[in-house]
Structure formats: structure tokens, C-alpha cells
Image: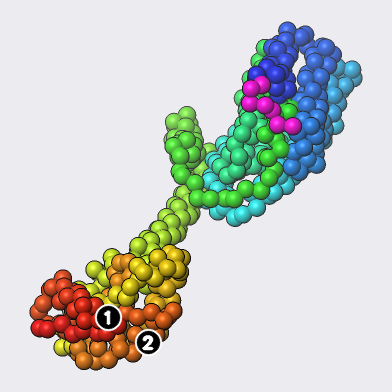
């Protein structure tokens, strides 16, 4: 059931859970480092897992099975925490690698698989620009991870081969999560409350995980408060996942969305710019701290080259998007021009088209030395036909007459609807031939109706408006002398 618009924020399950979560995390800082701390930590974490599972079912989320699996991945991480606490608190053993690492890495790897499945469902269309941006962000994080985490782990003589494998597995999983997070944030689709809660949960987890990794790398002795602060980052991630599940917006997060060309917002530009600056920043930092000796010169140079190529690839995608948009706009402009010059009832060119094409026809006749005649055609007694048979019949007569006359013309002849029941015709013939053509067209007029026409022959110098005025005067002469005839204008 959708939440009513008038329902207050405090009446919403996700909001209530978030408030209780905040209080629980603040209370966690006062719990001593005993089994009570473990119980408090795992209770808060499990509450987020249960909240997500219950919320997904309650809100009837799309792809509910995937969200339940995501909650299950978090439950595996809780099992890892319990395993770690058992060895540390009960057996007083400090192992590395430990059974807890198996739980943590398994849960992280499965979480990546589930998030990939959700993303494939949410973003089924190809989006090369979004993928390149995600790779840029991940590549910058990978360079930092290599310098501070991966390389030291591979060179640590105090670790066994299995220990090195475990040590590098954590940052690799985090890098994959960074890529998925970037893809989620950059991709299209709904960005409701559940989306923001889920994204913030992923950010909180990654911040806590990297903070923990860097404290180990720099051998920072985290006190009780700092340790609790790191734990709070993980707990906040668990809780935000649960709040996302309870939020009604979860029902739409896995629905397929149409990827469109998005505007390049300032925050995305700032984020990508910062990512491309990481490699030069590392180069500068190592050179400054080691008297111009760069220990990771090869990795940093490779990172710079990769960033440059990725930026060029992203620019190429943007240029292609602009070209596609320009092509679409050009086609739309042509269609609008065509519509603006086309009479919607008869399908003939309209008066606007006539005013553009008549001067061109005169120039063509002057250049080639061909004769040119202009005729003005008017359906006889059209008002009486409308009054007797109705306006719909009158519209039908205009449409059928235009089609019948067009069938009797040559490809180069120009017939337009000038306005109302009046039409204009330009043919590259003399006056006598134009009169004969119009006499052949008169019997084609449908519904037993007739027309009158006036024809003027262009003298090669006369302005178009003067030529039309002479043909129009001849039309009135044809009507005055009995209608259903063609009159030739005098020079």
C-alpha cells in the first residue's frame, strides 16, 4: 500500500527505524570492549538485515529475491564477526588468515554478484559513457589501493602465500564495490529515498573499510573511540540497507530504466576531475617526500596513461552524443519546415511554400528561357455547396479535388492551396498550353462540381505579385462571364 501524502514522517517505518538506529549507534560508543560490545554490534547489524528483508516483502519490491540475497550477504558478514569474536574473546587467539576472513570475503564476493544482477536488471541498455566514467573513478581508487594496500601486501615477508591472497582480496572487493557504486550513481532511473539510502549505505561501508585498511597500513594504534567510530561506519551501512528496504521506493529500484543522454552536471565533472588528478598528486607526494625518488613511478605513469585514454574515450562518447542530437534536431527541423509548408487538409503545399517557390520558378524560367504561366483556380459556388451538404463534405471536396487535379499534372508542375477554396498553379508552358491543361483538369473535379481559372503568362521581367494579380483578375473575368471556364489575362 502506498503511503498517503498526508502521513507524517514519523509515521513511516523507514524513518522510525533510522531514528532508532541513530540512537543505537550512539549508545554503542558507551559499550565496553567485551562480549557486550559484540552482542550490541551484531544486534544492530542483524536489525538492518531483518529490516531489509521485511521491507522488501512488505513493499512488494521488484526482483525481491535479489534484495533478499543482498540481505543474506550481509548476514554472512555478521557470521564472520561472530567467528572473529569467538577466536579473540573466547579462545584468545589472533589468527591471520582466520575463519572470519572466509566469511567476510565470501559475503563481499556474493554481494558483488547480487549487485551486478540488480544493475543488469535496472540498466539493461548499453551506456558506454556511464561505464567509462565508472572505470575512471575505479581506476583512480585502484591506483591508491595499489600504492598503499596491494603492493605492500604482496611484498610482506611476514605473510604466507594464503595470507597475501587474503590481504589483497579485501581491497580488490572494495574496488569492485566502488565501480558498482559509481555505476549506480551515474546510471539513470529513479532516484527516490530508497536509492539514496542504499547509496549512502554503500558509501558508509566503503569509507569504514578503507579507513580500517589505512589504519593498518600506517600502523595507527586506534583507541577505543576510534575503533568504535570505525564500527559505527559499518553499523550505519547495515542500518541504511535496512532503511532502504523499508522505504516504499524499494519497489521500483530494480525496475528496468531507459538510459538517455544525460546532462554533464557539475558534481560529475568535479568528481571525474578529482579522479584524474589522483595520479599526478601521488607522483608529487612521493617525489616531495623521497627527494625526487618515485617508488611507484611505473604504476603512476601507467595510471596517468590509462586516465588520459579513458578521458579521451569519454570525450569521444560525448562528441558522438552531440552529433546524434544534432542529427535528430536537423531532422526535426526539416520535418517542421515540411509541416509548416504543407496544407494539412489536402496535402498540397500551402501559401507559405508558394511564396518561397514561386520566385525560384521565375528564376529558373529566366535562366533557361522557358515560358511560364501562372493560374489561379477557384471552385465554383463552394459556399453554396458547404451550406447544402455541410462543412465536412466541403472539406472532402477540397481534398478529393486536390488529389484528382494532381493526378493530371506533370512532375514539374506546382499546385498549391492558396487559401479557402482557391488554388494556384505554375506550369512551364505558354498561355494556350496552360489553358488546354486546365480544360483537361476541369472534368476531373469530383462531386459534379466545377471550377473557374485565370491564367497569366510571365513576360520574363514582371514581379511575382504583379503576375499573380493579373491571373487573379482573369479569374474574376471567368466567373463574371459564367464560371466553369478558363480566362487568359491580357498582357
Residue at horizontal 42 percent and vertical 73 percent from the top? 397
> Is the stretch drawn in magenta largely helix, strand or loop?
loop
Residue at horizontal 30 percent and vertical 89 percent from the top? 439
Question: Is residue 3 on the magenta stretch?
Answer: yes
For the residue labelled by badge 1, is the local secondary structure a helix, a strand or a loop? loop
Residue 235 location, x and y as percent? Answer: 72, 22
Whether residue 4 appears in this view of the structure is: yes
Considering depth in this image, is 396 or 3 the residue closer to the camera?
396
Residue 306 location, x and y as percent? Answer: 51, 49
| First along the sequence among labels 1 and 2 | 2
Residue at horizontal 19 percent and vertical 79 percent from the top? 477
Farthest-out residue, right: 91
Looking at the picture, the colour scheme in use is rainbow
Residue 41 location, x and y as percent? Answer: 78, 18
For the residue labelled by badge 2, is the local secondary structure a helix, a strand or a loop? helix
Label 2 belongs to which residue? 443
The C terminus lies in which quarter of the figure? bottom left
Residue 195 location, x and y as percent? Answer: 64, 34
Question: Is residue 266 on the magenta stretch?
Answer: no
Which residues make up the magenta segment? 1-7
The N terminus lies in which quarter of the figure? top right
Q: Is residue 371 left or right of residue 341?
A: left
Q: Is residue 392 left or right of residue 117?
A: left
Label 1 belongs to which residue? 483
Please tell me whether residue 186 is drawn above or below residue 17 in the rendered image.
Answer: below
Give the quadrant of residue 352.
bottom left
Give the quadrant of residue 81.
top right
Amino acid at each position: 500500500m502506498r503511503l498517503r501524502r498526508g502521513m507524517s514522517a514519523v509515521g513511516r517505518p523507514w524513518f522510525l527505524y533510522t531514528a532508532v538506529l541513530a540512537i543505537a549507534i550512539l549508545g554503542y560508543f558507551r559499550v565496553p570492549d567485551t562480549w557486550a560490545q559484540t552482542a550490541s554490534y551484531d544486534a544492530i547489524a542483524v536489525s538492518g538485515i531483518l529490516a531489509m528483508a521485511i521491507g522488501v516483502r512488505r513493499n512488494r519490491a521488484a526482483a525481491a529475491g535479489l534484495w533478499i540475497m543482498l540481505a543474506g550477504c550481509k548476514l554472512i558478514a555478521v557470521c564472520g564477526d561472530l567467528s572473529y569474536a569467538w577466536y579473540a574473546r573466547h579462545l584468545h587467539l589472533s589468527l591471520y588468515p582466520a575463519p572470519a576472513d572466509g566469511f567476510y570475503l565470501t559475503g563481499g564476493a556474493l554481494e558483488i554478484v547480487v549487485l551486478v544482477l540488480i544493475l543488469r536488471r535496472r540498466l539493461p541498455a548499453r551506456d558506454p559513457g556511464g561505464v567509462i566514467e565508472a572505470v575512471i573513478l575505479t581506476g583512480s581508487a585502484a591506483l591508491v589501493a595499489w600504492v598503499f594496500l596491494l603492493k605492500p601486501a604482496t611484498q610482506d615477508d611476514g605473510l604466507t602465500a594464503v595470507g597475501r591472497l587474503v590481504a589483497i582480496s579485501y581491497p580488490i572487493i572494495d574496488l569492485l564495490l566502488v565501480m558498482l557504486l559509481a555505476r549506480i550513481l551515474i546510471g539513470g532511473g529513479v532516484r527516490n529515498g530508497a536509492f539514496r539510502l542504499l547509496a549512502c549505505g554503500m558509501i558508509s561501508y566503503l569509507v569504514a573499510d578503507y579507513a580500517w585498511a589505512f589504519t593498518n597500513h600506517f600502523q595507527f594504534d586506534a583507541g577505543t573511540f576510534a575503533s568504535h567510530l570505525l564500527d559505527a561506519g559499518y553499523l550505519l551501512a547495515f542500518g541504511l540497507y535496512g532503511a532502504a528496504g523499508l522505504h516504499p521506493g524499494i519497489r521500483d529500484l530494480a525496475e528496468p530504466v531507459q538510459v538517455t543522454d544525460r546532462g554533464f552536471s557539475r558534481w560529475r565533472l568535479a568528481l571525474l576531475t578529482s579522479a584524474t588528478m589522483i595520479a599526478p598528486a601521488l607522483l608529487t607526494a612521493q617525489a616531495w617526500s623521497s627527494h625526487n625518488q618515485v617508488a611507484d613511478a611505473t604504476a603512476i605513469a601507467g595510471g596517468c596513461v590509462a586516465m588520459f585514454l579513458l578521458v579521451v574515450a569519454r570525450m569521444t562518447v560525448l562528441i558522438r552524443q552531440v552529433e546524434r542530437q544534432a542529427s535528430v534536431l536537423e531532422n526535426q527541423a526539416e520535418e517542421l519546415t515540411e509541416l509548416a509548408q504543407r496544407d494539412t487538409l489536402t496535402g498540397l503545399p500551402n501559401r507559405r511554400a508558394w511564396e518561397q517557390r514561386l520566385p525560384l520558378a521565375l528564376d529558373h524560367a529566366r535562366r533557361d528561357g522557358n515560358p511560364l504561366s501562372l493560374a489561379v483556380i477557384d471552385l465554383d459556388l463552394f459556399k453554396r455547396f458547404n451550406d447544402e451538404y455541410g462543412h465536412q463534405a466541403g472539406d472532402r471536396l477540397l481534398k478529393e479535388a486536390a488529389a484528382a487535379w494532381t493526378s493530371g499534372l506533370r512532375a514539374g508542375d506546382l499546385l498549391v492551396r492558396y487559401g479557402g477554396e482557391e488554388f494556384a498553379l505554375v506550369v512551364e508552358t505558354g498561355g494556350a498550353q496552360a489553358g488546354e491543361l486546365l480544360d483537361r483538369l476541369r472534368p476531373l473535379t469530383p462531386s459534379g462540381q466545377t471550377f473557374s481559372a485565370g491564367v497569366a503568362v510571365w513576360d520574363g521581367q514582371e514581379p511575382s505579385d504583379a503576375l499573380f494579380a493579373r491571373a487573379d483578375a482573369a479569374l474574376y473575368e471567368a466567373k463574371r462571364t459564367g464560371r466553369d471556364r478558363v480566362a487568359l489575362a491580357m498582357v
